[in-house]
Structure formats: structure tokens, C-alpha cells
């Protein structure tokens, strides 16, 4: 399979604290991968390194070109600070990620693109509702739609289902699964929820003791959070 | 009332300042910079006092003070939680020195009140041109950085995650804010600039749910406020800034009431 992103000998230190030491792994086109590990092992740090928000102490993250163009990553961060009086509707919030242009207004093609993403994430009927008044699940769909607007090749969800009830978790993950499968998008799902990672990803990446191991999602032992290495 | 030069000048100047402040205000309110805007308008007064002391033009002093304080504030308050304290500290320092410079320069208090409260009906043709130029430069810059500025203002986390250079955008916006407050304040007064940069955008935030609505409501209420305020000042001979403040606050309270009754 074609590799879209490779992490090579990645080492990260924050002051005296060693977060990772020589991580190596890659993700292929259309692959569904989970990133698991106990709190504080550096899952979000690894994601930030992968998307370029942090610079590694040493090693590299290589984004491979895809069909002659740069790899695009869609990232849904773990925390979002949307105030209770934030004014923007769901549609306007999603459209924030429409991309660069010298003109402020959306072209007809851009409006169509926003409408298509809203339809894809079942938000068309809710598009005029202020995001601040939306439920947890609706907000998460809006965050997902905003990331999808850039038409990514790799979608990274950082704890996207945390603090949601079981039904809402299943609903959002079923939607994500349908979208990434249809679009042959790769998925990196950062989560503590091993039931979800087993159900919706094929392979896991486990961070423990500053190292990374991988295996099939089905082989994770929830008791020890240690999978069978392959 | 348009038979008089000073009223025509006031009308043109207030129209441009209302459009510029109305648009910048949407971003000021979204980025929670109302407090900084208030402080910048007072720091501008300190800068003008310094200029009087040093024998410079008031605009040079105001620009020097507002730009330096903005740079200090953005440098010292990387974390949002620390911003208010940093703004208080930096502005106390600048305003305190402004009082000192005013005393050292032997200027009467009317000089200070002129800078703080301004006089929209006493603007020269030269002042009108300065203001029009400022407005066009500020609006053109905002147009160029509109999309990343919008993303960063309304969803800072998402903007960072999607590769927007949020640090650069913040610096450009603070410079725009400092320049607008300085140029606007020496012509129409710090108070009017502060009123127009915060209240119409707050009204818009209460009523609008799309970017277009926010901009239209903010600019619309700013324009209605200055036009009505000028007309009332002309007919009553009371200060225009007073009427504009009252009208803008009335719009805001009306918006809050509307929101309470409809939601």
C-alpha cells in the first residue's frame, strides 16, 4: 500500500522530560488506525508533531506526495473554546476553513462545497443554528465538517468522542467511518475508548514507555492496554 | 445643516470612522479585545501628552505609545488568561507617564480633554482626508487578511490546527488597531473611537449569526448612531459624542432585550 505519512526516529523532549524516544511508524492510503495509550503519554503531542504544530527534538515526519500534490491533513483538536455567546451559525463556523483567497466573500463554488460538507455530515437542517446552542454531538459533527472542508487525505480525530454518551459516540463514529471509507481517506483516531477503536479501526498504535508498538485493533487487551505486537 | 463646512466635514469623517470601526469592531469583540481597545484609547492620550512635552505632532506620540504598548502586551501575554493583567499593567505605566508629560509640558487640561473626548464637529478638511486615507488603508489590509483573521478570531483552536499563522495575524491586527485608535482619536477623540469599536459589534454579536450579518449590523448601527448623533448635536448644541454613545448603547440594550424575548 502507498504510504502517505512516515514518522522516522522521532524524539521529543520537553526540558528534562523525555516524551518519545526514536518513534518509527507509517500510515498508508485509506488505512484506519487508532492511537492509544494512557493519559499523559504524549498522544496529542505526537499528533501536533505530525501536523507540524510542534518541532521534534530530532527525527522527522515525512508527508508523502499523493498523485503529484502535497498530502492534506484534516485535524479535529481535542479541546475547542466556543463561548456560550459565540454568535456564528454552524454553517458559518464550518465555512471558516474554506481556504485561502484574497477576497472575503465565498464564491459560488465555495458555497456549494460548504453545502456538500454540511449534507455529508447531516448538518443541512441545523446549518443556521448558532454553534453555541448545539448539542455535544452536533458540535462534534460541525468540527468534523470543518476539517472535511479542506478535503483531507488523512483525518485525525483527537479524542473526538470524549465526554459524549454511548449513542452519540456510535453515531459520530459510524458517520466518520462511512465518510473515510467512501472517500478512501486515512483515519487516525486518538482515543481511550478501546471498544470504539476495535470497532472502527484496523490497526492500533500504542504509546507506552516512550516507545510505539502496533498491531491489529482486535488484538488489544483492554485489561493491560497492551496489544499483541506484529 | 449641510450648508456649513464643519457639518459636511463631520458627516464625511463620521461616516468613514463608523464604517472602519464597525468592521474592526467585529474582530475586536470576537477576539475579546474590548478592554485593550479602551486602554489603547487612553494610552493614545498619554502619547499625545508626550508629543506635547517633546514638541512632536500628537499623531507621532500617539502612534509611538499605542504601537509600543500593543507590542508589549502581545509579547507579554502569550496566554489569554494573563492578558487582562498585562493590559492593566502596561496601560497603567503608559497612562501614568502621560499624566507626567502633561504636567511637564505645561499644557492646560483642555488639551487632554480634546484628545480624550475630541470634537467631531471641529474637523478640518485636512483631518477629513487623513481619516479617509486611514480608513481605506485599514479596510484594504483587513480585506487582504480577512479569511485567516476571521478563522483565528472566531475559532482560534481550529485556525491553529489548520495551519493559519495565528501569531502573525494577531500582530497585524494589533498594529491595525493601534493605528486606527491613534489616527481616529486625534480627529474625533478617543471616546468616540472606543464607543464605535466596541458597542456596534456587541450589538451585532447579539443579533447576527453569519459573518455577513455581523458586519452589516455592526456597520449599520455605527452609521445610524453617528448620523443621528450629528443631527441631534446640530439641533441641540450638545456634544455629538454624547448622543452617539447614548444611541449605540440604546441599540445594544434593544438587541439584548430582543434576544431575551425571542430565545
Image (cartoon, rainbow, N blue to C red):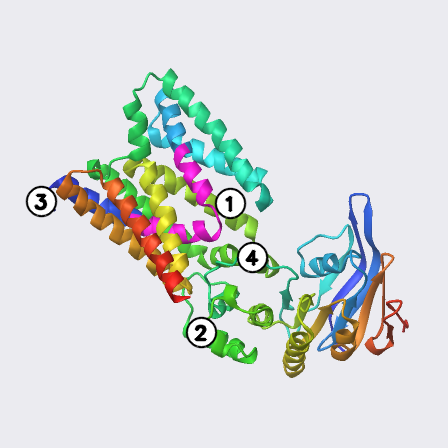
Respond whether the residues carrying marks 2 and 3 are from the same subunit. Answer: no
Q: Is residue A132 visible?
A: yes
Residue A54 located left or right of residue A39 = left
Q: Secondary structure at mark 2?
A: helix
Q: Residues within 10 Å of mark 4 (few under 14, many from 20)?
A: many
Disc 2 designates what residue? Answer: A111
**Whole-percent x, y for residue B229 in the image:** 22, 46
Disc 4 designates what residue? Answer: B164
Q: Nearer the viewer, mark 1 or mark 3?
A: 3
Disc 3 designates what residue? Answer: B3
- The answer to whether residue B59 is magenta is no
Badge 4 or badge 1: first in the primary sequence: 4
Q: Nearer the viewer, mark 3 or mark 4?
A: 3
Q: Secondary structure at mark 4?
A: loop
Residue under the point 40% across and 61% down:
B260
Quadrant in which residue B221 is drawn:
bottom left
Disc 1 designates what residue? Answer: B171
Respond whether the residues carrying marks 2 and 1 are from the same subunit. Answer: no
> Magenta part of the protein: which range?
B18-42
| The label number, if any, that marks residue A93 in the structure image | none
Number of marks in picture: 4
Instruction: Examine the residues drawn in magenta and state their main secondary structure.
Output: helix
Badge 1 or badge 3: first in the primary sequence: 3
Is A207 rendered above or below residue B92? below
**Whole-percent x, y for residue A190 in the image:** 73, 67
Chain ID of residue with mark 2: A
Is B237 rendered above or below residue A133? above
Amino acid at each position: 500500500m502507498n504510504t502517505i505519512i512516515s514518522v522516522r526516529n522521532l524524539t521529543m523532549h520537553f526540558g528534562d522530560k523525555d516524551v518519545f524516544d526514536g518513534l518509527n511508524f507509517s500510515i498508508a492510503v485509506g488505512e484506519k488506525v487508532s492511537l492509544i495509550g494512557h493519559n499523559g503519554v504524549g498522544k496529542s503531542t505526537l499528533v501536533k508533531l505530525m501536523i507540524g504544530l510542534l518541532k521534534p527534538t530530532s527525527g522527522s515526519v515525512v508527508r508523502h506526495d499523493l498523485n503529484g500534490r502535497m498530502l492534506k491533513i484534516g485535524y479535529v483538536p481535542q479541546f475547542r473554546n466556543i463561548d456560550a455567546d459565540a454568535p456564528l451559525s454552524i454553517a458559518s463556523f464550518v465555512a471558516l476553513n474554506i481556504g485561502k483567497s484574497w477576497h472575503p466573500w465565498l464564491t459560488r463554488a465555495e458555497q456549494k462545497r460548504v453545502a456538500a460538507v454540511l449534507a455529508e455530515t447531516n448538518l443541512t437542517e441545523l446549518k443556521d443554528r448558532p454553534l453555541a446552542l448545539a448539542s455535544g454531538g452536533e458540535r462534534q459533527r460541525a468540527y468534523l465538517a470543518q476539517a472535511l472542508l479542506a478535503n483531507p487525505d488523512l483525518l485525525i480525530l483527537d479524542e473526538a468522542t470524549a465526554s459524549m454518551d454511548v449513542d452519540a459516540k456510535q453515531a459520530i463514529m459510524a458517520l466518520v467511518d462511512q465518510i473515510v471509507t467512501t472517500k478512501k481517506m486515512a483515519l487516525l483516531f486518538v482515543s481511550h475508548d478501546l471498544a470504539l477503536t476495535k470497532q472502527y479501526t484496523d490497526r492500533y498504535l500504542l504509546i507506552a514507555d516512550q516507545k510505539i508498538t502496533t498491531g491489529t485493533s482486535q488484538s488489544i487487551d483492554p485489561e493491560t492496554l497492551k496489544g499483541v505486537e506484529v | 445643516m449641510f450648508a456649513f463646512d464643519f457639518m459636511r466635514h463631520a458627516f464625511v469623517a463620521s461616516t468613514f470612522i463608523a464604517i472602519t470601526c464597525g468592521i474592526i469592531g467585529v474582530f475586536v469583540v470576537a477576539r475579546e479585545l474590548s478592554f485593550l481597545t479602551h486602554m489603547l484609547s487612553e494610552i493614545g492620550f498619554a502619547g499625545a501628552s508626550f508629543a506635547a512635552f517633546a514638541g512632536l505632532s500628537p499623531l507621532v506620540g500617539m502612534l509611538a505609545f499605542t504601537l509600543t504598548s500593543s507590542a508589549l502586551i502581545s509579547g507579554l501575554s502569550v496566554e489569554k488568561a494573563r492578558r487582562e493583567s498585562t493590559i492593566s499593567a502596561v496601560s497603567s505605566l503608559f497612562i501614568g507617564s502621560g499624566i507626567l508629560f502633561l504636567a511637564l509640558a505645561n499644557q492646560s487640561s483642555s488639551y487632554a480633554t480634546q484628545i480624550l473626548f475630541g470634537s467631531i464637529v471641529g474637523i478640518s478638511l485636512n483631518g477629513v482626508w487623513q481619516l479617509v486615507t486611514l480608513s481605506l488603508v485599514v479596510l484594504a489590509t483587513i480585506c487582504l487578511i480577512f479569511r485567516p483573521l476571521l478563522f483565528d478570531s472566531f475559532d482560534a483552536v481550529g485556525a491553529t490546527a489548520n495551519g493559519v499563522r495565528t501569531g502573525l495575524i494577531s500582530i497585524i491586527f494589533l498594529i491595525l488597531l493601534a493605528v486606527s485608535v491613534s489616527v481616529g482619536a486625534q480627529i474625533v477623540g478617543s471616546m468616540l473611537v472606543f464607543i464605535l469599536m466596541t458597542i456596534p459589534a456587541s450589538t451585532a454579536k447579539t443579533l447576527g449569526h453569519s459573518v455577513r450579518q455581523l458586519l452589516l449590523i455592526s456597520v449599520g448601527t455605527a452609521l445610524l448612531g453617528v448620523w443621528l448623533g450629528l443631527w441631534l448635536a446640530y439641533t441641540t448644541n450638545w456634544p455629538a459624542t454624547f448622543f452617539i454613545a447614548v444611541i449605540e448603547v440604546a441599540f445594544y440594550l434593544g438587541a439584548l432585550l430582543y434576544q431575551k424575548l425571542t430565545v
